[in-house]
Amino acid sequence: MISRTAAALLAGSPAIADAHFRAEAHPYHPELRPDGYVNLGTAENRLVWDLLAERIADRPPTTEQQTRYAPLHGTDELRDRIAGLLTRLLGAPVKGDQLVVVSGATSALDAVASSLCDPGDAIVVPAPYYGAFDTDLAGRSGAVLLPTPYAEPQALPEAVEDAVGRARRDGLRVRAVALSSPCNPTGRVYPAAVLDRLLEVAARHGVEVIADEVYAGSVFGAEPFASLAGRPGVHLVWGFAKDFGLPGLKAGVLHSTDPQVLAAARAFAYFAPVATDTQALLAWLLGDPDWVDGFLAEHRRRLGASYRAAAGLLDAAGIPHLPAQAGFSLWADLAAWLPAEDFAGERALWQDLLDRTRVSVLPGEVFHADRPGRFRICHTADPATVRTALTRLGAHLTTPTPRPEGRTR
Amino acid sequence: MISRTAAALLAGSPAIADAHFRAEAHPYHPELRPDGYVNLGTAENRLVWDLLAERIADRPPTTEQQTRYAPLHGTDELRDRIAGLLTRLLGAPVKGDQLVVVSGATSALDAVASSLCDPGDAIVVPAPYYGAFDTDLAGRSGAVLLPTPYAEPQALPEAVEDAVGRARRDGLRVRAVALSSPCNPTGRVYPAAVLDRLLEVAARHGVEVIADEVYAGSVFGAEPFASLAGRPGVHLVWGFAKDFGLPGLKAGVLHSTDPQVLAAARAFAYFAPVATDTQALLAWLLGDPDWVDGFLAEHRRRLGASYRAAAGLLDAAGIPHLPAQAGFSLWADLAAWLPAEDFAGERALWQDLLDRTRVSVLPGEVFHADRPGRFRICHTADPATVRTALTRLGAHLTTPTPRPEGRTR
């Protein structure tokens, strides 16, 4: 028999991770496995390895010191270098002693949620949202997430305010509002004025703000990115998975100016430290700010090109999608192709696409979309493979076939 | 305001970690800082770096694959190689799919405790025990640890049985018994017959066994080490910190044959993964079994020599200590030097030793010793430094000074 927390975690196993490993087990290859799966479900940045390879190959040898015990919330060297990077990237002063380094953005989200919330406390989350928040923010803390739909970005602060009020009338203690900014899955960059109003709402109701800014360096559109770094009541998460294309290195960071939250997060970091050897590699990567800034500029350039190519293919196939200014994905609207106008219909379409096109994308239900038919399509894999996959998807959806009404699987 | 779990963690901040970083901040150096601290408080293996350095320097370059998402409970390659190592080291068949790799033995202990225990459930822990169990096993799971003294190893199973009975009469749900084997802090190797009887007691009472065998490869005495690997109801923890002298690499592993516990632990591994890059380094280290076995043999040889040298210095100074067969420390008895016969007296002696000799050792209270005066003295630092420190300690304790009665700090 296992604990209640363990049983709940197993029942809520992140759908994103499951889909990823299923698709990766039999991957598409133009010659070796042309009927393999193309994984456009995982937001993995495969556009920049050539830029990283050379610098990683030049890493200095591991020293004795780098194999010993070190502060479990990150070495001084790495925290100071991340602080320098974030100060440039977020446009706000970030100090090394305001950072807690842990084994991935997931662990950072868990650390801040577990620092703020007792079991049963509520976190308001504007929806659609990054589906793994369900596990990252609530899986260990015992918090309850309240998905909060909003019609358009301008309406987000008021939607949050209404949700806080409703939750309190229901007897819940609301501790935080959490959002990814830029937004995953929509690729939206929130206007600064919207974020300012969100912070006003949070402050007025005594609610903390958890800002997941893991895509801060992945903005390619015209809307300027406004970081919440350093604003009162804001606890910010960043990591190396997205902007640096290093998801395997499992290094995330929490930034806060709240001494209590920092102390608590350091206590949780004891359970999720990053190896000193990996920290040394990351510190080495960040050791040359000119290289870093050049790398990030080229990353953004390629990302924009990747987005425009993918958006063009969807446009050509007549598949509607939201315009994105950031992130690794398109938020497409396949409502017209649903076999039934509900989330069961969405699941059926998802399964149909996976079986018939061998393209893995994620259905909107995973992101708590408020209506069925949305799909998140990641475009940051190998460009030729993405083209193949989106062409397959487009051809499948535009082929006039009997509307698959009544299909049940 | 922070959560109750966070507040409890901060209140119970592991004394071992605190003492470590205080001592490391101003370390002794024979020429550069002769009045610096010698840290004999941390069980860190500084005897084998020369053996590791060459092999680590030969690590293959990081590949693109090693920077991508991988199974969060360890790559197949690393788990299979650890399985091979543990099969040889523990003398029982261990399979890769019975392993969950996480960011350190601490995370593995947390994963198994959180898999087994709901908040308030009890874990019986024979005492003295590794002080960080208080945080590792209870800090996040919410379990309650019940320190259970025993007079000698033969009496351990009955002491556990009595504790289980007492706890149940008190209305507690007892889920597990946890012990480090070989024993930290005493350096004892438990006789196989004692462990067999402990397993009988656990099975009879429906209690799981958490076996921390991080010192399995650090046995130098005559008593043969009997691993509990693969025995029914046993969940075993091992890591690279002790036997491989790589505490900075934060890689621990849980072994179990219980499918439910394995599934639960994998769910917790999601929050504490090891970087793929570090996993690749560890897989490289284990890739040559002949090198590994030669390394471990030399590690044990040096460890035995280190123990005998340290024991000889204590003997020469007339400081009583328990004979050890394993581990990195001596369990010394300084009761004769206590200014008062209680744990306040022990703390005063500890502070006196730290101030007057600049040698950091850990008082028995940290390990839940049942009477004051015990100290754990680690001997696995640089041999000349250990000699200096133990000579200082011996000289200070054997110098006839007025018994420091009434000192209060």
Image: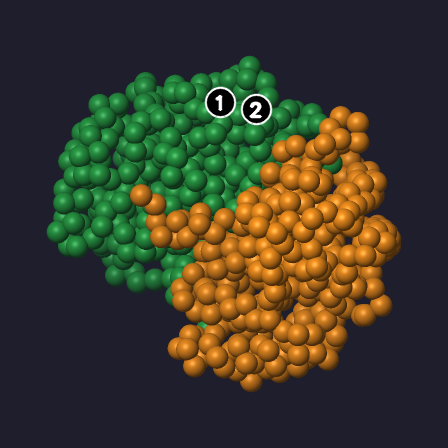
Chain colours: A green, B orange
Which residue is label 2 attached to? A286
Could you tell me which quadrant the C terminus of chain A lies in? bottom left
Local crowd at mark 1 within 10 Å, few (<14), some, or many (≥20)? some
Marks 1/2: CA–CA distance: 7 Å
Residue B297 image-quadrant placement? bottom right
Q: Which mark is residue A362?
A: none
Q: What residue lies at 52% left-to-right and 58% top-to-bottom? A: B134
Nearer to the camera, A231 or B378? B378
Query: Amino acid type of disc 2?
Result: Leu
Examine the rendered structure and indicate whether residue B12 appears above or below residue B196: above
Marks 1 and 2, the one that precedes in the sequence: 1
Which residue is label 1 attached to? A85
Q: What residue lies at 76% left-to-right and 49% top-to-bottom? A: B400
Q: Is residue A169 left or right of residue A35?
A: left
Work out whether residue B337 can be spotted. Answer: yes
Mark 2 falls on what kind of element?
Answer: helix
